[in-house]
Image (cartoon, helix red, strand yellow):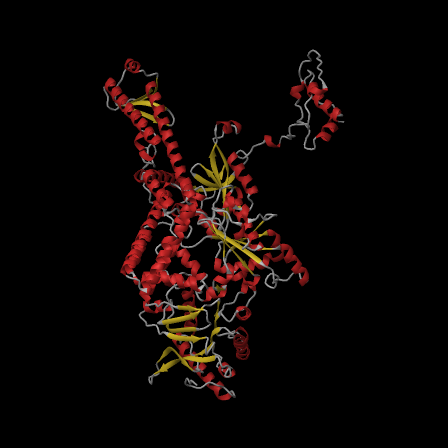
Amino acid sequence: MRIQSLQTRAVIPLRLGRANLQPPVAHGRPQLRALCNNARRPTPYRRAQWELHRGAKTKTSTKLKDLPQGALKLDAYDDGADDGPQYPMVVRGHRDNMLKFKNCVILTRVGNFYELYLEQAEEFAPLLNLKLATKKTSAGPVAMAGFPYFQLDRFLKILVQDLNKYVAISEEFANDAEDRARSGGLMFQRKVARVITPGTLIDEKFMDPSENNFLLSIHIDAPSLKAGMTEVGDASNQHLLLSSSQRVGLAWLDLSTGDFFTQPTTPQMLSSAIARIGAREIVVDEEIRDLVGQELQLLVGQDHRLLTFFKGPKEISPMSEWSPMLEAPVSSSEESLFTTEETAAGYSLLEYVRHQLQGINMKLQPPRRRHLDRSMSIDRNSLRGLEILETARDGFGKGSLLHAVGRTSTKSGTRLLRDRLTSPSSSIDEINERLDLVAQFVEDEVLRDDVVQLLKRSYDAQRLVQKFSLGRGDPDDLICLARAIQASQEIRRVLSDTMAANSNQGAADKTTKLSTSLGIMINRLYLDGPTALADKILEAIDEEGLMQKHRIEDSTAADAVQLAQEVIISEGLPEEIDSMPRKVRSKNTGKTGVSPESDSADYDTWIMRRDASETLRKLHGNLESLLDEKSALTQRLRDAVGSNTLSLKWTPGLGYICHIKGGKISQSELEELGVTRSVSSTKSTRSFYLPVWSDLGTRIDQAKVQIRQEEQRIFEDLRRGIILNLVKIRRNAAVMDELDVACSFAILAQEQRMVRPILNRGTAHKIVGGRHPTVKLGLEEQGHRFVSNDCFLGEEERIWLITGPNMAGKSTFLRQNALITILAQVGSFVPAEYAEIGVVDQIFSRTGAADDLFRDQSTFMVEMLETAAILKQATPSSFVIMDEVGRGTTPEDGTAIAFACLHHLYHVNRCRTLFATHFHALADMTRDYEKLGTYCTDIKETPSGSFSFVHRLRRGVNRESHALKVASLAGLPVEAIDVARDVLHDMRANRPGFQGVRSAQCI
């Protein structure tokens, strides 16, 4: 059969070679199909090809061994469908990318614009406030929309940050001569260079520099989850994950800084971990979508995070194989500290990022494990209820704890402060080291001011160095990085001088201890390599030339803006002109850029100094001699023709020309100059080719190209220097951030008269004169005074039951003690006269709730879910605040639930608890609880009927809530207040055993 097939392969071209040109015989077709399944029938012969004169018969023979071996190769069958009109190449490429990147918005670079086509243009043009236009093609009209390239960040912000979309950017890449020949003369090829998602931002201008942009991976073993579902026996169980004992692995990274973390957790703590990390995007293997996808979506949706299901790797590579993506390898001993789930989550995360970056190399920090036993756990409800990062009512930063205590000088310092507030330390040694450093800056104001001034001159080294590790970064980034390294060098000098001065003054214990904290910071700074790199950068880059380059680029951008404006003016409606940015509308219509016909030598800018390298110095010397030669030639030609208007130019269309304006010159004079031919001539101007200028101009351009190439080589050498010093620069940047946070806390302590807390391993709180850090600031802005309170929990009284009127400060007292505890374990001084705190492992806050109708949860259901989490998870080392538990139901049911919570906290959890309530019967029901104390706030009334709140706590029970007084303050109509007063009087008179009295009583 093989021989038959080979014979057929040889016969077909021989028969076609005969003059009669008859089609192939029918019996040959089955043999061809048997040889190659992909072969299709040949294109039908046209009648015109057959109408030829018969020629002489020929006979050709060949040996079997000379026939080609292997599978039969035939051209694919062409049924003529492609002979019709087709879309232009750019539209076809855009359509292909839409099919390849199905979940992405495709932005295609076309010259100075990014464009959308087809249905994506129709969908997103209104959302981006772009004009939807129609592109006429031979295949029919195509919807399109676009914007100038320099507005990319603006529209990425809308798509990625506001709309939570994935964006694939198709860039232009210049074709070399071989590629142009292969592509039919195309100057560019377009391909997707990067896929941008909310979690894979690198250096986009719309990123918040004071927040990390984390991408989180959650790993849950699918086979184990399926087994658990089988045991439960209910495939529709909506709480399968929360009810399982499945181990969960977390891994998260920030591509803009290179930070990489892992952590093990449980399904029950997953919600809190997600809230604490605050990732912009969460990725999960699509294998578990059908199992717990809906449950995860509900869990993630509470914090408005984007959940991405993707096809994860089938096999998990060990950390020892992650080295190409890390700045340093992970040793086997370090790898053994990570759980299997953490490793799987980390590898899945790296694979997802690698796919989105489309081949861009990255250098992340080695994964760092977050140990649950080394930090205080703050669950999602407490983060929101205590308003640590944002206010609960409107989600604003102002009014939060972060806003109240933030005095940092750098954006990276703010990121570290944010991280510490959401994950305070539970290590006494670590806390005391931080407090020692803060104390040093509190004691030495001169040192603190010097460090703060140097920090303000620094830049975000973490994000700058990460740019270069990803193959990005420009000369401006090099300058900023060099300045940051210099600031680190100066800070080290200042710290060293202070240490030396302290050691010369004497060996006081306090001074020695504080100097030790400075010594730790100094020893962690590695400046030998980075300092040499910074000097090399500043010696190489010409900052004045760089500024000139930016001015030219701004001019070019202004021209593009003008072009976009002209397009809208000519094609758009008046309201579309008003929709353009104000800067665009106000641009001067005059051209500000360099004319393409100008003498380009006058506008060349160089970003490297001439002495950056010996080669560069020689190249600049060569260029100067060529420019001198040009000047001499110009003057010689002017003298020859007797006109000072003669100039030597280069234009894009004509090349190197000699141009005369306003002068008359004869043909014989031109011939004497060596002119080969005239280019153009008008009444006042004349242009012609001059071989000597063409040769000189070519040599000048070649010299400039050589300078550009040498500058690029120097730039790449500096980039390599950064990569070689990557670890040191990142470590130094981490030290700078810690100094920034310490100085911030020192400034805060001085402003707010804070004291250093004492941390111990006990389970007691001793706070004298405690103040709420955010409420105090708000009252002072309004001209009011904040009333401080004491709090003694743990030894004689584990639980305080607090009663009192509305608006008298019960909730404030609860929150302020929780926030004081957080600040103490973060490493800050605290707003109190004295504070001694046993280290807390978890803080729980149940302070108010709102319904969640989207998830079919009433206000009371939300309250009970939060309460259940506290009763299940609190330990003797935890700190719990509970405000008005049971208020969402009837008084009887609410009292029963509140008492059950108190009973459980007292007998089972045995933790420090502040419990505020309006159910006064609880005081009687818990009278036998020896380690429960009752405290209250009050109202002070005057004979005239006016009243004021007494915010200071005192021992006892206040059985009057004074709700009508608060209602009156809120502005309820007098008639409604009178009705309420009558009803309340009747209820008290008719209800047996009613505990209320007209005036407040304390027992």
Image vertical order of residue 555 relative to residue 222, above or below:
above
Residue 950: x percent and y percent? 37, 78
Image vertical order of residue 678 relative to residue 594, above or below:
above
Q: Give 567 or 862, whichever is nearer the viewer.
A: 862
Q: Quadrant of residue 723 in the image?
A: top left
For this orientation, the residue located farthest to the top is 56
Q: How many marks?
A: 0
> Which residue: 41% across, 37% down?
716
Image vertical order of residue 994 relative to residue 691, above or below:
below
Whether residue 203 is visible to the viewer of this picture, yes or no, is: no
Residue 62 horizontal side relative to residue 880, left or right: right
Q: Quadrant of residue 673 in the image?
A: top left
Q: Give 53 or 692, whichever is nearer the viewer.
A: 692
Residue 374: x percent and y percent? 48, 62
Residue 957: x percent and y percent? 44, 82
Position of the C terminus by quadrant = bottom left
Whether residue 189 is visible to the viewer of this picture, yes or no, is: yes
Residue 318 horizontal side relative to residue 752, left or right: right
Position of the N terminus by quadrant = top right
Q: Give 549 or 840, whichever is nearer the viewer.
A: 840
Image vertical order of residue 239 relative to residue 362, above or below:
below
Residue 77: x percent and y percent? 65, 30
Residue 265 horizontal side relative to residue 510, left or right: right
> Which residue: 25% across, 19% down?
636
